[in-house]
Image: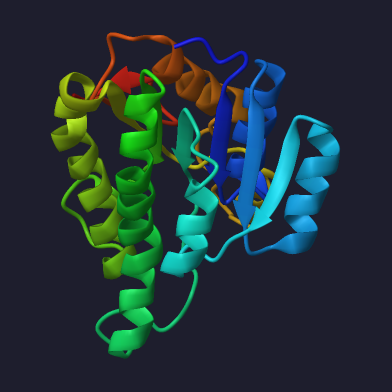
Amino acid sequence: MEIKGKLAVVTGAAVGIGRGIAQRLAAEGASVVLADIDVAGAEETRELIGDAARFVRTDMRDDDAVAELMSYEPQILVNNAGGGPELRPCFPDADVGRWTASLDLNLRAPMLTTQLALEPMRRAGGGVVINLGSTAGLGFGPHVSPEYSAAKAALIRLTATLGVLRESHQVRVNCVVPDWVATERGLAEQAELSDPGPPLIPLETLTDAVVNFIEDDSLAGRVILLDREQSPRLLG
């Protein structure tokens, strides 16, 4: 799919990865709807992009707000909003409301946006959904936030199962799974470590992966891992 002239919705677009993706899509010629609860950050993103961007304040855990966001009927949807492992306490110490809120943000929200996007995308002749996973959703070791890790694992698996939508709806769903990314926050956190390890993933590497998933019509239900120690590689 050609990006130029398309309408894209990017969730979690106020800072970091979401901002970088929104800027890249705008640079490629898309109009971008920025969704976030961080008004100041999202307005800054909008100003950085210019006339190609508009901001819609959206709590991704609010079904009505999500429905309003998806009424823009994008041809490109980037499910980037997420997070939560930095919040304490986590499962099993957190109460039910706290850990289910993480599942709602990291799994239920992208499922709902995708569901709402499908029919408008089909009517428009096709579309692309990009999910942002996490290496927390891979492997078999422990994670500080089991609910976050479980949600990201489910999102990765969900992406793979939705490969069939290319035939039924002309919608391709793919997932980018990054290791630690060189955002402003990521670099600040790395600087606090006594052993920072390998260099962080350049933000451009991540946005390249997003653009490739959108433009390459052969890719559906695929997952790409961006590893700090290896070249990007497709997992499925």
User: Which residue is found at the position 32% from the left and 78% from the top?
Assistant: 99
Residue 17, x across and y down, in percent:
59, 41
Q: Nearer the viewer, residue 94 or 198?
A: 94
Q: Is residue 15 visible?
A: yes
Residue 172, x across and y down, in percent:
30, 24
Quadrant of res 120: top left
Q: Quadrant of the C terminus?
A: top left
110 up-or-down from 183: above or below:
below
Way the structure is coloured: rainbow
Quadrant of res 127: top left
101 up-or-down from 76: above or below:
below
Q: Is residue 229 left or right of residue 173?
A: right
Q: Quadrant of the N terminus?
A: top left
Q: Is residue 24 left or right of residue 59?
A: right
Residue 187, x across and y down, in percent:
66, 45
Q: Is residue 44 left or right of residue 36?
A: right
User: Which residue is found at the position 76% from the left and 44% from the top?
Assistant: 45
Residue 93, x across and y down, in percent:
30, 88
Query: Outermost residue, front direction?
Result: 123
Q: Nearer the viewer, residue 183 or 47?
A: 47
Q: Is residue 225 visible?
A: no
Q: Nearer the viewer, residue 221 or 224?
A: 221
User: Which residue is found at the position 31% from the left and 36% from the top?
Assistant: 119
The number of numbered discs placed on residues in the rendered structure image is: 0
User: Which residue is found at the position 48% from the left and 75% from the top?
Assistant: 87
Quadrant of res 24: top right
